[in-house]
Each structure stands twice: as C-alpha cells, then as structure tokens.
Image (tube, rainbow, N blue to C red):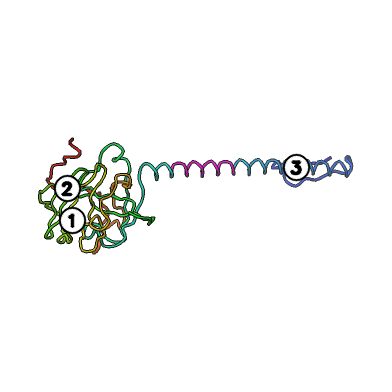
Amino acid sequence: MCTHLDSNQGPLVCDTSTLTAELCVQIVIRKLYNYYMSLKSFLVNTLREIVQTVALSLAIFLFVYSFLVQPHRVKGESMVPNFSDGELLLTEKVTYRFYKPARGDVIVFKAPGARNIDFIKRIIALPGEKVRIEGGTIFINNQKLEEPYETQQTQGNVDVALGDNQYFMLGDNRGSSSDSRVFGPVERSSIKGRAWFVYFPIFKTAKSDGARIVSRVDYGIPDSFNDR
C-alpha cells in the first residue's frame, strides 16, 4: 500500500508488497493532479482579486479626477508672490457646479488656442461688466479696483465689455503674466475649477508660503452678475 511519512502529507511511500507499481504511479499522479488544481484555483482567484482591485481603484481615480479634484503644478512666475513656480496644488471642481465663479477667485482654465496646457490666474471681472485698464490702474464698471495683495502696476490699455459667459483674468505678477490683456476674456466653458489647496512644499520656504488653503480676495466691488 501507499502511505505518507507523517500527518502533514509528506513524501508518498509505496509498499510494493501489497500494491503494484502501476497502482502506486496512479496514486502519485492523482496526488499531483489535485495539487495542480488547487494551485490553479488559487492563482485564478488571486488574479481575479487583483483585477477587481485595480479596476475599482481606477474607477475611483477617474471619478475623483473628473468630478472632484485635480492636481496641478504652478509653472512660471505669473502669480508671484502669492503662488511660486513649482508649487503643487489641488484644483477643486465641485463649487462651480453649483455656484458661479466669483471675483477674486484663483482659477485654473484651459489655455486659449490649441495649446494643451492649463493656466492659473485670478478672476478680475465678471460677465456683463466693463473692464478698463488705463495708466496702470484697473477700472471695473468705472470703479477703481483696489488690490490688497502685492502686485505691480497693470500695464497695457484695455477697454472691453464682457459677454454673458466671459471672465477677465489677470496674473498677480502683472509684469510677467500672459493673461486677458493678451488673449482676451476667457469663456466659462474653459474654466476647470478653483485653486483650493497648496499641498507642496509642506513647510514655508524662501520661495513658498508652504501648505495652505487658497482664499478668495474681496475687492469691495459689488458682484452685479452673481446678484442678478
């Protein structure tokens, strides 16, 4: 007969005094087959779990990326000193699904033209308003815009009336910003979301204020578009 050396099903030993060699071979083959089927079932189940986990993770990522938040890197000096080159931030996409973009919001939008890049700028004027830049000063509906953050004089001569879905964007660092003075108003459909949270660098450095929530600036100018 065929027996195992121990209770843990160790190496198979055949007693050829009672069983033929052919029967012992069949028992060994059956044992190997059962082991093969167990291993196959384990591998199939493990692979299925991996595929399901990856698919679920991808679905969650795509949902978050498309509808909730999207990471962006600040490139260039157009938003200095409030945002520095190389900072990483999260752009949230929820607010503008329920509310209109507001003056003073820092937003991310698709760059005008065929360039497949995003810009980060600040909303200065809203749909239906008149924007005039003259002598380094910005006027919204003939009211001077007082900016509470550090910036330079706003160069250029602009006199434009915004359409129903248009926003006027400027970079905080006016001398190094390509913005609505150059490419004109930005359509509402181009806005991807509101800059919400700077998460890198975590700690304050010589160039960065560190991790922080991005706040809206209140210019004290009535928001006639959102109030009507």
Give 56 or 38, whichever is nearer the viewer.
56
Q: For residue 49: magenta?
A: yes
Q: Is residue 176 above or below residue 214?
A: below
In the picture of the structure, the residue carrying the numbered disc 2 is 130
Q: Earlier in the sequence, mark 1 or mark 3?
A: 3
Placement of the N terminus among the 4 image quadrants = top right
CA distance for labels 1 and 3: 82 Å
In magenta, the rendered stretch is 46-60
In terms of image quadrants, where is residue 171? bottom left
- The answer to whether residue 205 shows anywhere in this view is no
Q: Residues within 10 Å of mark 3 (few under 14, many from 20)?
A: few
Amino acid of disc 3:
Tyr
Residue at 25 percent of width and 40 percent of height: 100
Let me know if residue 84 appears in the view. Answer: yes
- Mark 1 or mark 2: which comes first in sequence? 2
Could you tell me which secondary element the residue under label 3 belongs to? Answer: helix
Q: In front: mark 1 or mark 3?
A: 1
Q: Callout 2 environment at 10 Å: few (<14), some (14 to 19), or many (20+)? A: some
What residue is rendered at 16% in x and 47% in y? 130
Residue 33's tag is 3
